[in-house]
Amino acid sequence: VGEDSPILSMDLLYKHVIPEIQVGKQVFFMVMDCMRLDHWLKIKPLLDPYFQITTHYHYSILPTATNYSRNSIFSGLFPLEFSQRYPDLWVEVDGENTSVNRYEKDLMRLQLERHGIYLKPTPHYFKIFDVRGEMEYLQWISNIQRISLAAVVVGFIDHLTHKRSEIALLKQLMPDETAFRTFVRGWFQHSGVYKILKLLADRGVTVILTADHGSILCQHAAKVSGDRPATNGLRFKVGGELICDEEAGLRITQPEQYMLPDTPYEKNYVLAKEDYYFVYPNQFNDYKHQFNGGFQHGGISMEEMILPCAILEPK
């Protein structure tokens, strides 16, 4: 990859986090799972009073799914490189299996060591899934004297995105992208995450805030078929001999060309384009109705791929 190439998921730590560490700053690295660029633009004004903010941009790798994009962020590697270099840490995707990201702390440490960085105090890693997690982390950060690098993954927006497709009330509260943005801003304004960031500003800690991938409002169903079991995602599938309409999706038959692994068995990837989502031919109309109008990720769209990486310097 050349010097003029766009910044991708695996470049984030090297391009934005490590330079801040190397000049001796305390660095807080926050990954907001599934935060779209327009979500960030709604949140940013709430942080402007506390930070001098510079917003950079990066592109998620494909598929725009947590197990690929976020593992790439923390490992600093494409999925193919990751699976070859650390086969014991690579976990094959299986639906919404959260265990595929259980090695992020180790991957971050290994990436830092590859760049010759050994920090004291030891880098800290934490995942925030709910209010209890927010309060637990707020208490920890309040009591700690100094950090070298602290990384936090916040799962609220991703959780909200998936639950919206399952809970009718959430769909009524967020019928479109405008309402979704407003809902995210309201959550953030009253969240423990906001309190954590204000505390960090008060303590002079540099914050780097980004997302692993976004999501897109899906309006068109497309049929997909294959001769082997495939993964459950609506915007991307991994399996044997997968076939979809060329207008609706990209079919990848040589995964290594996209820096994707093709083990343990020969397989294809199909990635949905624009606002399509994949449905199997059996019970097509039932599933089409169930998932139409849902926010999904894993495919190819600007909303899923173009993401903020904001540098927040305390005022």
Image: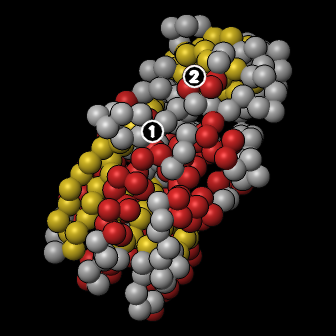
In the rendered image, residue 98, in percent from the top left (x then y), is placed at 68, 52
Where 222 falls versus 121 (above or below)?
above
Most distant residue in the front direction: 116
In the rendered image, residue 26, in percent from the top left (x then y), is placed at 35, 77
The quadrant in which the N terminus is found is top left
Question: For the residue marked with disc 1, what is the amino acid?
Answer: Ser
Total marks shown come to 2
Most distant residue in the top direction: 246
In the rendered image, residue 82, in percent from the top left (x then y), is placed at 63, 45
Disc 1 versus disc 2: nearer the observer: 2
Q: In the visual, does 11 lie left or right of 255?
A: left
Question: For the residue marked with disc 2, what is the amino acid?
Answer: Gln
Question: Does residue 34 appear anywhere in the picture?
Answer: no
The quadrant in which the C terminus is found is bottom left
The secondary structure type at the circle numbered 1 is loop
Q: In the visual, does 98 lie left or right of 300?
A: right
In the rendered image, residue 59, in percent from the top left (x then y), is placed at 39, 38
Q: Foreground residue, 288 or 210?
A: 210
Which residue position holds label 2?
257
Dot placed on the residue nearer the N-terminal end, 1 or 2 = 1
